[in-house]
Image (cartoon, rainbow, N blue to C red):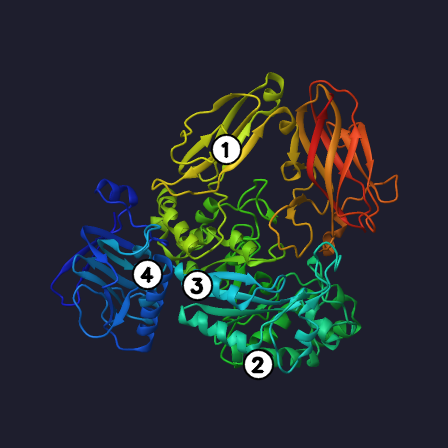
Amino acid sequence: MIRLALLSRCGCLLLALALLPPAAARAAGAPPPSLIPQPAQLRLQHGSFTVDAHTPVVLASDDAATRQTADYLVGLVARTRGLHLRVAAGTHAHAIELRRDPQAPVAQAEGYALDVTPDGIRVTARDDAGLFHGAVTLWQLLTPDARQGAVDVPALAIRDWPRFAWRGLMLDSARHFQSVADVEKLIDQMAQHKLDVLHWHLTDDQGWRIEIKRYPELTRIGAWRTPPDAGRDGEPQRYGGYYTQAQIRAVVAYAAARHVTIVPELDMPGHAQAAVASYPRIGVTGKRPAVSADWGVNPWLYNVDDGSFAFIDHVLDEVMALFPSKYIHVGGDEAIKDQWKASPAVQAKMRALGITSEDALQGWFIGRIGQYLDRHGRKLIGWDEILEGDNLPADATVMSWRGIDGAIKAALTGHDVVMSPAPDLYFDHVQGDRADEYAGRLGVESLKAVYGFHAVPDVLNATQAKHVLGVQANVWTEHMPTMAHVEHAVFPRLDALSEVAWSPAATRDLPGFLARLPAQLERYRAQHVGYADSAFAVNIQVDRNVALATGKATVTLSDQAGFGDIRYTLDGSVPTLAAPRYEAPLNLALPATVRAASFAADGSALAAPRARVLDRAALLSLPGTELANCPGSDFRLRLQPTPDAVSTQPVYAVNVFDACQLFPPTLMDGIAAIRVDAVRLPRNFALAGDAKLVVSRPHATPFGELVVHADRCDGPALATMPLPDPGHGPRAFSLHATLPAQTGEHALCLIYTAPVDGPLYASGRVSLEARP
């Protein structure tokens, strides 16, 4: 237990504050407050204070920022609790008091003190951000459950401040475009979690999203792309959009009022296809490409001549006028150097500069941009590739995304760093691997995994560790066409991120975090935030082959987080708290239907009910998302039917390098046929140098086949099903074939042999059919 002695404002009271873990709070007879992120120091005391519609919010500091914080608090409580407080000036008894005080107990930047006694509530801070954070913590105390109206707040003393100055979230608006309202909704949730940096990814190969008045073609041309299969199966004829400068100013102001700084990113020298499509003269070849409709890494680069730099400088001038942030993010990642290598003019420039490699030329390029930003009082930040070369400005900050090696190198060489590694903090990775999970990248980055992220590499000493400014999660939106997809990817992992970024590392406690989370889920519901319940969704598992052989199933129920009570039914009804509690595996005779859901200790639902039908036909049928990759490549995506589909289901598991999957070993006695519900998907992936890894197989029919092999991918071919003409057939179709008789357990290897210069194919469901 950590203790800290602090003097009160009057100097007459010695207050012992203790960080009280949830278990100790329960032992003391009171539940822990459901606060996320966990405060640095918290002590529960005796008594409580009731806040109702008659409780005034008193402005002890007469300034605009305090008034703004009060108004935010009042509005948020009204929306989420239905409790309408009023702001008042002067002195009032039994009130909520907000006070800016240069002598407030917490001296750290953004810190605050929050005291609840039976006589009232006081929030004090030395700066505006701290007072705002204290008000957000108070809002959480006022919303401990889903009830409406008055609330009893436990007496307590909190002294709180952030662990890191950079507590960030990156939103990619280039691949898919979000409305201003969507962006502001996300900023609001960031503020409620004490995150303070929105890294806004505004330009890439697939779209230019920021109005630049000097260069109107950037939004007239660069903001729009023609999707694959445009106009078919719900795919739009063109996709895009952009933010006007007026809209950006409004979003920046909205964020600033919530103490969130927006750091814009304009990617360079690579990921520049949309810019070059708008103004070919800034590219290397002088040719005009289309705005890319492919995900991945494209080859188009900025040129390195004076005209291209003048263009970039003019763009940065307008960007800096819109965003007052100290940092400007210039990307710097995944710049394929083929165009530079092939350009006589670029090679001549390298010789003139005495540069011997294209990687060093990128370093010179980034250094040139950094110098321009420095002359305008700004700092350059970029992905960890900016460390390549010798011209990086001394005050440049590195965002480490290729694991943590970039962070270590940056800190060792004296550069500040933001920890943002893939896959740990890449929220485009799915939260779970259930069949009903949304589109995204595999493997799974669970709520638990994000909570356990270690922000400061162990190899750094205390001095080097000071270069770690903080942490950031990234929301890449290739597979997130709508805000519903973004919210599913971000929440509730944002809660875990906030605790990693704000709370002291020594206080982190996963069981305590999970115990505090149900109240936050209620806050999400009150604000119509579509969070994912992947961590708490019940998995209903059975040994398929034992059940097929015996007609009896041993069913186990579990969830990813290992938290909460699982309740189940066997009669098809929806589980409630009155349903049986899962204690041990269930032994059931087939056929049966199991429904299960998980509940928090307060009775609130942690996840929607899940169901599984257990009969012979169901046990012989699996969704394609449950089929494993064939040996040789672990790359795996969950894709929607079209790149811009606004639906959340269905999704299909795809390995863009090898169209081969394994149906697991199954008791094949009596199996006569196989049915595959298949789908044709656009092959819109720019693989750059990795294109050579795509497996191409011979095909006997014009459009390829689905070939089923016994046991292994080089095993005997059991069935061959020709694929339909992709130019005329439906996107989704069924394939059917008889199978030779087999006995015992056998796996099946399913391989699509379609030409690799055509569409991708995936299996929505694979079903084995028994003889009548």
The residue positioned 69% from the left and 73% from the top of the image is 354
* Residue beneath disc 3: 188
Residue 745, picture quadrant: top right
- Position of 283 with respect to 374 (left or right) is right
Q: What SS does tag 4 mark?
A: loop
Three-letter code for the amino acid on which mark 2 is drawn: Asp
Per the rendering, the mark at residue 595 is 1
Q: Is residue 493 above or below residue 183?
A: above
Query: How many circles with numbers are drawn on the protein?
Result: 4
Label 3: which secondary element: helix
Q: CA distance from mark 1 to mark 2?
A: 59 Å
| Residue 572, x across and y down, in percent | 51, 31
Residue behind mark 4: 161
Quadrant where the image shows the C terminus = top right
Q: Tag 4: Cα neighbours inside 10 Å, few (<14), some, or many (≥20)?
A: many
Which mark sits nearer the N-terminus, 2 or 4? 4
